[in-house]
Image: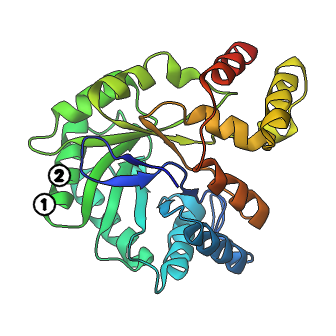
Amino acid sequence: MQFRPLGRTQESIPVVGLGTWGIGGEMGPDSSRDDVGIQALRLGMDLEMKFIDTAEMYGAGHSEEVVARALEGRREGVFVASKVSPRHFAYDDMLAAAKRSLKRLGLKQMDLYQLHWPNPKIPLSETMRAMEKLVDDGLTRYIGVSNFSVEQMKEAQQSLSHEKIVSNQVEFSLIDRSAEARILPYCQKEGLTLIAYSPLGQGKIPRGKGASFKVLDEIAGRLSKSRNQVALSWVLQHESVVAIPKAADADHLKENADVGNWKLGVEDCQRLAKAFA
């Protein structure tokens, strides 16, 4: 597994981590497949994908509880990230939300705490003051954002007095390349990590048809890799990007982990960029 620096910190994280949307439920809790989710997370960790990303919004908090069970006896060396919902961006609400997440995760400290979506109704200066307090109190090691524009990233950083934002988690795949216009260049320039969610296009890449996908399949066949592996490797061509695909199937997890062991060539990256333009 390849590792990359988290922002401008001394921390290194796997290029392929474990997304958890749908594990433990979606917008409400669902415990019917908890054991499947736990097995998937543990297999992922065994395959060196020791970066788990969750959120208080996932399964209305139950996803964090499933992560806690998967981490039992395995916390050492695993980078754990969660996200706070926009409705909790007020100062006191933020501190309380972080403590609830930690309790559900069974942790005293998160590695990365992220603002899940922007909330224009609450001053970002107040929100970032709370985030900085969480770092100062040892409840999270690092601060990140998610789904933030360049302007919002700038405002968030300017609102911090002594900490740095280390990452922005956004959707990025061959199917959704909107981050390439401004967000990715800004992250590269400022030394931020772009954490790519839905790097397989929310399931569209495995099912896609047409001329673009013929190019993808030709490259995959030549390299003896799957369509998903090539698409995921394309996302990871940028040194500032890591990805968090969600997978519960053992074969898919093994495929994802293998992407951390090789790189797609420059020419193939360019062919795919043109095919999916």
The residue indicated by pointer 2 is: 132
- Residue 142 in sight from this viewpoint: yes
Residue in the image at 15% along x and 57% along y: 133
The residue indicated by pointer 1 is: 136
Horizontal arrangement in the rendering, residue 105 relative to residue 246 (left or right): left
Q: Are marks 1 and 2 in contact (CB under 8 Å)?
A: yes
User: Of the residues shown, which amino acid type is indicated by label 1?
Assistant: Asp
In the displayed structure, 85 sits above or below 158; it is: below
Residue 105: which quarter of the image? Answer: bottom left
The C terminus is located in which quarter?
A: top right
The circle drawn on residue 75 is: none
In the displayed structure, 270 sits above or below 228; it is: above
- Residue 201 in sight from this viewpoint: no
Residue 202: which quarter of the image? Answer: top right
User: Of the residues shown, which amino acid type is indicated by label 2?
Assistant: Glu
Horizontal arrangement in the rendering, residue 55 relative to residue 254 (left or right): left
